Image (cartoon, helix red, strand yellow):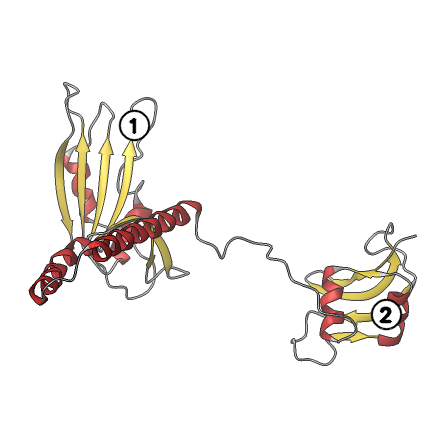
């Protein structure tokens, strides 16, 4: 018979209290047990002396006859120095970036490594140059700085005051300009472009401290009218609080009646 040292739940609804017991591994969690070895009360603070109570002598006895503790009980026993502290496996990936973000980081690292290799190769092949030749690359370095500022970052994290978590993400962050996209396709799709339909995007843009733009692509047969576009001048409410609203631009691209190329219908500055 396999023996396990585990927790058996007691207490009431939303106020749990656990008994540390040794039981047959085939028994239910809160079912029959062989012996009670301690208590665990998660409702008291972590530094409270009655949070975890253990009968060390009996626990060592059951460990000596082959009883195996569960992961949670093993941590308790490791903290009490009854047995070695078990290794805690990493059970979540929420602390890691998204898959696309990791791919972009790898691509950026590869590009940076390629640039470093390209710079080191000519330096290793070139003979000893005159002092004037050494100063020439230094004079060209400042010209490359503006290009680095206009970097493109997809799914960019941002600080959004007024949000519950004060955090959020924009579709793109281009040189410090936050960009949100919305698309309406042809077919049976109903109105998915408008002030109410794009209120989430508008709220994020108004919370952004820098320049921002909402870009609308309309591939349907019924473009928005100027009256509908004028409604974008009134952004949605940000809820309670004295929040600073930032201006943003709305760019609307559409198809004309002849199904010709898309064009800018209106550029609205919201203040």
Label 1, residues with CA under 10 Å away: few <14, some 14-19, many ≥20: some
In the figure, is residue 96 to the left or right of 36? Answer: left
Q: Position of residue 235 (x, y in %)?
A: 24, 50
Tell whether 218 sits left or right of 3: left
Of 223 and 145, nearer the camera is: 145
At 23% from the left and 34% from the top, the residue drawn is 217
**Residue 3 versus residue 49 in the image, above or below:** above
Label 1: which secondary element: loop
Instruction: Work out whether 90 lies above or below 241.
Output: above
- Mark linked to residue 37: 2
Q: Nearer the viewer, residue 164 or 183?
A: 183
Task: Tell me where residue 47 appears, x and y as whole percent.
Answer: 66, 79
Q: How many marks?
A: 2
- Residues under labels 1 and 2: Cα distance? 65 Å
Disc 1: which residue: 185
**In this rendering, would 106 be left or right of 8?**
left
Q: State the residue at coordinates (21%, 59%).
A: 210
Secondary-structure class at tag 2: strand
Camera-side residue: 171 or 199?
A: 171
Within-10-Å neighbours for mark 2: few <14, some 14–19, many 20+: many
Q: Could you tell me which residue is drawn at 23 percent across and 51 percent down?
A: 151
Measuring from the top left, give residue 236's x and y in whole percent: 28, 51
Q: Position of residue 116 (x, y in %)?
A: 28, 55
What label does residue 170 carry, if any?
Answer: none
**From this viewpoint, which residue is outermost toward the left?**
132
Whether residue 120 sits left or right of residue 41 in the image: it is left
Q: Residue furthest top?
A: 258
Foreground of the two, 215 or 69: 69
Task: Identify the residue shown where x is 37% and y is 51%.
Answer: 105
Above or below, 59 relative to 239? below
């Amino acid at each position: 018979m396999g023996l396990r040292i585990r927790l058996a739940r007691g207490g009431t609804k939303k106020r749990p209290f656990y008994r540390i017991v040794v039981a047959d591994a085939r028994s239910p969690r809160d079912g029959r047990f062989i012996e009670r070895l301690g208590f665990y009360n998660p409702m008291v603070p972590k530094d409270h002396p009655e949070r975890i109570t253990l009968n060390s002598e009996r626990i060592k006895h059951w460990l000596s006859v082959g009883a195996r503790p569960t992961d949670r009980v093993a941590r308790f026993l490791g903290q009490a120095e009854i047995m070695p502290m078990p290794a805690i496996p990493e059970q979540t990936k929420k602390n890691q970036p998204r898959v696309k973000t990791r791919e972009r980081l790898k691509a950026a690292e590869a590009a940076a490594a390629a640039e470093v290799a390209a710079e080191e190769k000519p330096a290793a092949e070139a003979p000893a140059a005159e002092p004037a030749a050494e100063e020439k690359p230094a004079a060209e370095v400042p010209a490359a700085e503006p290009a680095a500022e206009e970097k493109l970052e997809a799914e960019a994290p941002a600080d959004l005051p007024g949000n519950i978590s004060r955090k959020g993400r924009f579709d793109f962050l281009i040189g410090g300009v936050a960009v949100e996209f919305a698309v309406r396709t042809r077919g049976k799709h109903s109105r998915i472009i408008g002030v109410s339909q794009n209120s989430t995007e508008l709220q994020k843009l108004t919370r952004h401290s820098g320049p921002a733009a909402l870009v609308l692509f309309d591939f349907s047969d019924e473009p928005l009218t100027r009256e509908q576009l004028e409604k974008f001048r009134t952004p949605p409410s940000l809820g309670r609080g004295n929040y600073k609203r930032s201006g943003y631009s709305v760019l609307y691209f559409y198809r004309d009646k002849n199904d010709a190329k898309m064009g800018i219908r209106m550029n609205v500055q919201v203040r």
